[in-house]
Image: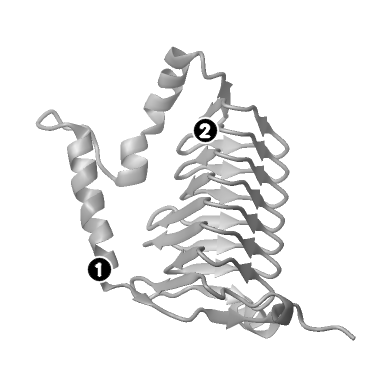
Amino acid sequence: MTFPEDYLHPVGRGAVFIEHQHRHPRVDRSAYIAPTAVLCGDVTVGPHSRVLFGAVLTAEGGPVEIGAHCVIMEHAVLRGSRRHPVRLGDHVLVGPNAHLSGCIIDGDARVATGAMIYNGARIGSGADVEFGAVVHVNTVIPPGTAVPIGWFAGGDPVQLVPPQQWDRIASVMEPLNYPGTVFGVTEAPSEPVITRIAQRYARALALHRYDENVTPELLDEADRERRDRV
């Protein structure tokens, strides 16, 4: 005798689901969301995916979309923004303490422990971002590429730079425009750019005052087919 998978693994028992900016999480019935995980706002978790303990998926004005058979491991953070949503294709593994902000991860890819991928980046199918590696804003990692442990990846076409070569890393970073891409601010002679970043970001985060804890919307195959037709 067999049982539906959602009976064996209840969706989100003990997890935190939050409505933010009138958007709430949607989770496939076959998914598993661990206790202490947090899903905030316009977050969608696809079939047979797993979000483990302490992971945070937060839609800060833009969606976070997780495909099928994905694993988001302990204490990973996935953050979507208004200009840069987070989208994971099918069969993506995100390791513990990884940080993904405003990026797209195509299918069959791996993001290892402690890796960081920033806004506007795209990771091609079959790529590996190794332990502690950094993929900077507006960078494209071609399919099947491996970013080595602790290395920096920047640009399109991408340059892979070892951590000891700081001057080269800085030269690659500058034209990619981190402050403008992530926070929408530019350099100004009148004040440090970090002042404007902090003020702008604090204003945006103030919207969390109006959040509400909710029960997630549960999706099944029929729901997914209806959404695909819309």
204 sits left or right of 106 in the view? left
Which quadrant is home to the C terminus? bottom right
Q: Secondary structure at mark 1?
A: helix
Task: Name the disc covering residue 209, or none.
Answer: 1
Q: Nearer the viewer, residue 113 or 193?
A: 113
Q: Secondary structure at mark 2?
A: strand
Q: Quadrant of residue 129?
A: top right
73 sits left or right of 6 in the view? left
What residue sits right under mark 2 in the picture? Answer: 134
Q: Residue furthest right?
A: 1
Q: Residue furthest left?
A: 190
Instruction: Report the Cα–Cα distance between label 2 and label 1.
Output: 32 Å
Q: Nearer the viewer, residue 54 or 118?
A: 54
Q: Quadrant of residue 143?
A: top right
Q: Quadrant of residue 184?
A: top left
Residue in the image at 29% along x and 66% along y: 208
> Closer to the camera: disc 2 or disc 1?
1
Badge 2 amino acid: Val
Task: Name the disc covering residue 86, or none.
Answer: none
The x and y percentages for residue 188 are: 16, 32
Q: Nearer the viewer, residue 110 or 113?
A: 113
Residue in the image at 44% along x and 53% along y: 84
